Amino acid sequence: MNKFLNNQPARILLKNGLSDLGVACDNHQEDQLLSYLDMLIRWNKAYNLTAIQDPMEMIRLHVLDSISISHFLNGQRFIDIGTGAGLPGIPLSIINPDKHFTLLDSNGKKTRFLFQVKIELGLKNVKEVNSRVERFLPDEKYHGVLSRAFSSLSDMLEKCSHLVLDNGCFFAMKGRLEPDELGDIPSEYQATEKYPIEVPGVVGRRHLVKVEYIGAGKKTVG
């Protein structure tokens, strides 16, 4: 039984957070997000999916944090690299049923959890993949590569360049953004936008860095 569907404090926190983010969400989508939270809590006991134990903190630090980048996603096909428990991919797939999300992780336990989430929540726009990113060769490339797991932008670009369309983008969710990290981006890429993100109820800086392919030797300083 999903006890979070009737957990009014959790639903109110979620509803208010989505409103603060300016994200439209119907009752069915709210139910899906709360059901995902319930599954995450239950499976976490055996699968060690997240270090966060408090359900309200999961809403803030996992669900709302993931959804905070929804407005910036242009295109239809996205891949979430090192998705772990499905973050940010699962919350984004619920909020954006018209977009497709591939969730990639090298940990088989985590992708088994994602498969079960997909089935139980009826997420037809989600595909889970158990693979290392360097070895994954998609049938179609993606409009966007998402991650909040890579340690550096340069590492993300090096390992994921084969996944994105020529006019696609990389979206890196970061906490602290070090100036040196932007300077280490390969010359054929440009960090075109750096968006500060405010997540309701979360203290601390968050950023979304958008990186585009610009061609060799065209990088500008800025």
Image (tube, grey):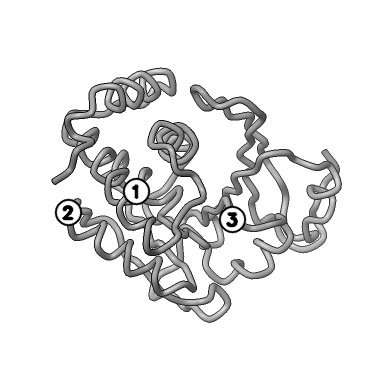
Q: Which residue is mark 2?
A: 122
In the image shown, does 204 or 133 lie closer to the viewer?
A: 204
Farthest-out residue, bottom: 135
- Mark 2 or 3 closer to N-term? 2
Where on the picture, by quarter, is residue 21? top left
Which residue type does callout 2 highlight? Gly
Is 1 drawn above or below residue 166 in the view shown?
Answer: above
Residue contact at pointers 1 and 2, CB within 8 angstroms: no
Residue at 17% from the left image edge and 54% from the top image edge: 122
Is 122 drawn above or below residue 96 in the view shown?
Answer: below
Q: Which residue is mark 3?
A: 149
**Mark toward the viewer: 1 or 2:** 1
| 3D distance between C-alphas at marks 1 and 2 | 19 Å
In the image shown, does 97 or 68 lie closer to the viewer?
A: 68
- Mark 1 or 2 closer to N-term? 1
| 3D distance between C-alphas at marks 2 and 3 | 26 Å
Q: Which residue is mark 1?
A: 41
| 3D distance between C-alphas at marks 3 and 1 | 20 Å
